[in-house]
């Protein structure tokens, strides 16, 4: 299986399955001498881990990271950083009923047809549990980036939307509620809706928005490695993501060029930021902001018609512990993937100036 690595200079490779002994990864290309705050790493892991609230899967995993190499006396050595996260709360029997059955909208069918086998215990390699490794690497990348600040939050769940721009929000509220929405009133509605959907044995999707601030001018490598192209690839590689939009996005198509152009101030900043902080695939020093759309979780606790490995029509129903809405736990994953992209371009930019 190819495609287990992400990045050029700052590169993450991950391994492991949802119900295996452990998952883990290797971070290659991290500069030497970066002082690592392990508490911040674990903090991001705790934001992603299962069992953290009543509106997420009740699988209980401490998700404690064990670093194996690349860090000595609290600082990176410049050598590969190896780490593992042990799986301690697997319930593989919850998946025995789908051993020969393809779950609708899952990777079961495509994995089986492509590789001739599949790990039906939680999806194996296709499980969102793999994203825990990304959060570890993202937490390290954030500490490489220094002043650059990456902030993600839930902006919609189903048809409940946060109708405010990121400039109007107080991000200190984001971690004070289970859905990670920085507007308390909207967060309360979102949480109630997720609980209602869960009681119906169903699931719901939503949108995570992200802003990257204090970005230097010049990050991005045209023609094919544009900054927004790599951010799009990073976000679309996350499980359940169905869309990526940056800057004015699709709404910008309704404007005229004279309305959409970001006019310059004398210092090189722009009066507006419909470009989303990126022009010509290169950061222009303004805030980078984007949206990531997540579909409803595919496993529902309702009976659905599907097929088995023999091509026969059968009926199945989800069992076990699953998220009714993946969005709250996806917030730190979006931040992590953004950090990996920015760290990669940050280091590439340094090399290009040598």
Image (spheres, rainbow, N blue to C red):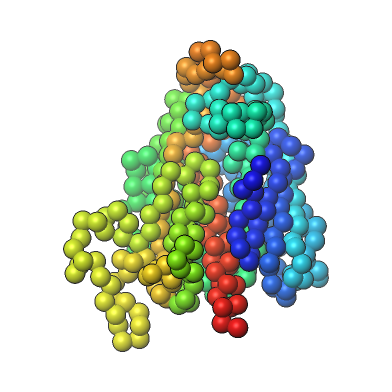
x then y, percent, for residue 105: 49, 30
Q: Is residue 331 left or right of residue 50?
A: left
Which of the pair 5/86 is nearer the observer? Answer: 5
Q: Position of residue 18 (x, y in %)?
A: 67, 38
Please indicate, yes or no, whether residue 254 appears anywhere in the rendered image.
yes
The quadrant in which residue 269 appears is: bottom left
Q: Is residue 75 above or below residue 105?
A: below
Left or right of 336, for residue 190: left
* Near-viewer residue (1 or 178): 1
Observer-nearest of 160 and 313:
313
Seen as rendered, the residue at the extreme front is: 223
- The answer to whether any part of residue 174 appears in the image is no
Q: Quadrant of the C terminus?
A: bottom right
Is 127 in front, or is 330?
A: 127
| 179 to 76, vertically: above or below | above
| Residue 204, picture quadrant | top left
Q: Is residue 123 above or below residue 273?
A: above
Q: Position of residue 324 (x, y in %)?
A: 49, 34
Say if 14 sits above or below 296 in the image: below
Residue at point 70% right, 29% down?
91
In the rendered view, does 86 fall on the left or right side of 327? Answer: right
């Amino acid at each position: 299986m190819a495609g287990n690595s992400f990045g050029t200079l700052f590169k993450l490779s991950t391994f492991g399955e949802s119900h295996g002994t452990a998952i883990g990864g290797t971070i290659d290309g991290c500069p030497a001498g970066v002082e690592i705050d392990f508490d911040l790493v674990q903090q991001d892991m705790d934001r992603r881990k299962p069992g953290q609230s009543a509106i997420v899967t009740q699988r209980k995993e401490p998700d404690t990271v064990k670093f194996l190499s690349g860090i000595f006396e609290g600082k990176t050595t410049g050598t590969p950083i190896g780490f593992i996260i042990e799986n301690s709360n697997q319930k593989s029997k919850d998946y025995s009923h789908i051993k020969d059955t393809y779950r609708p909208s899952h990777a079961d069918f495509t994995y089986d047809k492509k590789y001739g086998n599949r790990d039906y215990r939680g999806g194996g390699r296709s499980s969102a549990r793999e994203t825990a490794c990304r959060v570890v690497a993202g937490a390290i990348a954030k500490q490489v980036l220094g002043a650059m600040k990456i902030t993600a939050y839930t902006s919609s769940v189903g048809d409940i939307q946060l109708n405010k721009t990121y400039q109007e929000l107080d991000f200190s509220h984001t971690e004070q509620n289970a859905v990670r929405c920085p507007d308390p009133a909207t967060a309360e509605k979102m949480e109630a809706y997720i609980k209602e959907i869960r009681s119906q044995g169903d699931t719901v999707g939503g949108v995570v928005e992200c802003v990257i601030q204090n970005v230097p001018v010049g990050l991005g490598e045209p023609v094919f490695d544009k900054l927004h192209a790599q951010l799009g690839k990073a976000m679309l590689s996350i499980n359940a993501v169905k869309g990526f939009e940056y800057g004015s996005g699709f709404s910008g198509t309704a404007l005229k060029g004279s309305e959409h152009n970001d006019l310059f101030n004398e210092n090189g900043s722009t009066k507006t930021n419909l470009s989303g902080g990126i022009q010509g695939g290169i950061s222009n020093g303004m805030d980078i902001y984007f949206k990531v759309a997540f579909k409803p979780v595919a496993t529902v606790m309702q009976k659905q018609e599907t097929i088995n490995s023999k091509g026969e029509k059968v009926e199945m129903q989800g069992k076990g512990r699953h998220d009714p809405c993946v969005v709250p736990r996806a917030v730190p994953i979006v931040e992590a993937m953004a950090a990996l992209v920015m760290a990669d371009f940050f280091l590439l930019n340094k090399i290009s100036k040598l």
